[in-house]
Amino acid sequence: MTSNDLKRGQVIQLDNAPCLVLDVTSQSPSARGGSTLIKTKYRNLLTAQVLEKAFKGGERVDAADFEKRKGQFLYADGDNGVFMDMENYEQYELGDEIYGPIKGYLLDGTEVVMGVFEGMVVSVEPPMTVELVVS
């Protein structure tokens, strides 16, 4: 894939990490002989940092070994959450860095979307709507 093919929502590999493209803008120079710049804003899915990078037009960009899988939240175990992959029934215990921000929106048995990079869960998306009781 080239930098001209980048779109919002794609996952690319930069510095051996999966990165979610948040924004893409194209800048054409006015001077002769200048090449188009593709400016991206992305989130490193391993560190959660939001960074920016500019690519030259047509520069090669690697797609990440990343896939989204259906999962299910099973239960909380202290500060960790236990999730199950619905395709192969493998269970993952995720720490507070991934589970912490979404734990208030998950009930036992809630279906989620897990982002898997090289066999490791790096992100969990809660459902778009949840029904919770306010007490």
Image: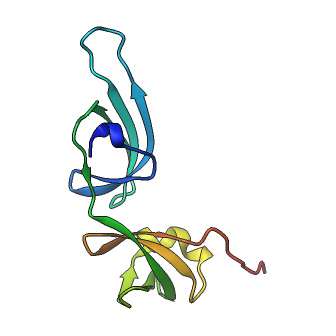
Q: Is residue 56 above or below residue 65?
A: above
Query: What quarter of the picture does the C terminus occupy?
Result: bottom right
Q: Residue at x 48, y 73 (%)?
A: 113
Farthest-out residue, right: 135
Q: Is residue 19 above or below residue 107?
A: above
User: Toward the viewer: 65 or 91?
Assistant: 65
Q: Residue at x 52, y 67 (%)?
A: 101
User: Toward the viewer: 90 or 88?
Assistant: 88
Q: Is residue 96 above or below residue 55?
A: below
Q: How many numbered marks does the figure carry?
A: 0
Q: Position of residue 48 (x, y in %)?
A: 39, 57
Q: Is residue 83 above or below residue 40?
A: below
Q: Quadrant of residue 84?
A: bottom left
Q: Quadrant of residue 17?
A: bottom left
Q: Residue at x 43, y 32 (%)?
A: 25
Q: Position of residue 47 (x, y in %)?
A: 34, 58
How was the colour assigned to the protein in this rendering?
rainbow
Q: Position of residue 125 (x, y in %)?
A: 51, 69
Q: Residue at x 52, y 76 (%)?
A: 112
